[in-house]
Amino acid sequence: MNLFNLYIIAFILVNPIFNCILFSIGIHSESGQLQVAYITMFILTFLYILRDFARQPTKISINFFIILIISIILTLLFFLTQFFYSMPNAMYESELLCWGASSLPAFFCGLLYKKENPENLHKILPFFIVPLTIIISYVSFTTDSRTSADRILDEATGMNYQSIAYYMAQLFGLTIFCIISGKNKKEIKTNLVLSALLILQFITCVFSGGRGGLLLLLLYFIFFVYKKIKSQKVNIISILGLILLLMILLFLVFKFNILNTTGFSRLVDTFQQGDSNRAILQTKALESFSESPIWGHGIGSIFFEIGTYSHNILIDIMVETGIIGLISIVLFVIKCSSILIKKNDYNSLFITIIFIYALTLNTFSGYWLANHLLWFVFGYIISCRGDLNFSRVN
């Protein structure tokens, strides 16, 4: 088993893995504990970079220097913002540390991933997906203090309703990746188990009451159908299988009375009425943006302007970098999507699954510079610079 593949999977799933381990030994996660996991991944990334230099000491990729320069600029801009405000902000300091401990190494991890070009992730991922799905589902359905929105202690970290929804949606996407990639006859049994897990992941995600997780499920399902249609492998068996899967999902929804849970009710109320607390934050953020619409207030300034992030990546970027920064980043995201569509190979499929998750997460929650998966994707895309000979697979 390739150690680099294990490292990549651990980096991608560091949050659910760490929280599941802590829960299994009876400890509730706190942000400081999670930073230990991030620092561990930082050290591993640094060691892999050193190993890469040791292999080819006189051949340093220009992509490495591009990522290094961007990292230095963003770190300096992020760090210097605090000096333009008189009052300190604890969340700013926390997210600055998170940028350094998780997103920066993830940026370089994307570079390493492109160079290593792994091909057997779908064979290793099930060993992570199966236990994580079982543990998180167990938490959601049986533990009174940390489960879905009708029984949860709404804490900022750990196994709360929001993290459960996102973890399950992330596992749902990675399960789809394994199913699409597992084409050998030897992998049929594994794919059957993974298909069954999709149902459990769906039920747990919806039951938890996280709207971002639900949207991720829908996006992944649409992506799965799109890949099947594009591969021209949609036959009567696939159609009947899809219909059967939907019937099973609907049966389980009514069997477990999901529609009557507080978790599902929260989803409906949020989509119909909106989230008043986040609406207030976003209104304040837009008012702050109007004060400096061209260049913004500086990276990390959102915490000083409204006290926290706005729970929307576009609004955060608008406040911090203005219209100039927003346009630049949106164009870069479009370029990322274009590259992934053109490459259409094994690794671009994996990166696309991660990209969908990262963007959806920051649309509803989290801070864009502290989302290590987003920067993992950015590192990979920058490493594809000049890679015009895209291989195409079905």
Image (tube, grey):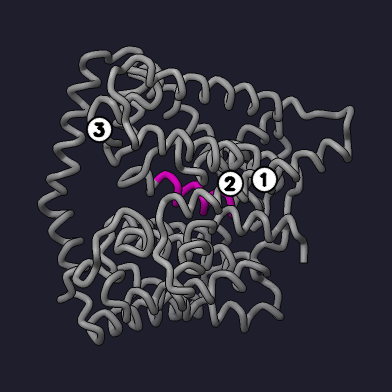
Q: Is residue 5 magenta?
A: no
Please give the residue where the numbered disc 1 appears in the rendered image: 43
Three-letter amino acid code of the residue under disc 2: Ile
Three-letter amino acid code of the residue under disc 1: Ile
384 sits to left or right of 326: right
Query: Taking 221 as reference, is 39 above or below it?
Result: above
Three-letter amino acid code of the residue under disc 3: Gly
Do the numbered discs 1 and 2 sit on residues whose CB atoms are within 8 Å? Answer: yes
Q: Secondary structure at mark 2?
A: helix
Q: Residue at x 82, y 43 (%)?
A: 51
Query: Taking 352 as reference, is 103 above or below it?
Result: above
Residue 376: image quadrant is: top right
Query: Taking 391 as reference, is 247 above or below it?
Result: below
Q: Residues within 10 Å of mark 1 (few under 14, many from 20)?
A: few
Label whose residue precedes the other's in the sequence (3 or 2)? 2
Q: Which residues are magenta?
A: 350-359
Does the rendering let one see residue 350?
yes
Please give the residue where the numbered disc 2 appears in the rendered image: 39
Q: Secondary structure at mark 1?
A: helix
Distance from disc 3 to disc 1, alpha carbons, whole Å, reads 31 Å
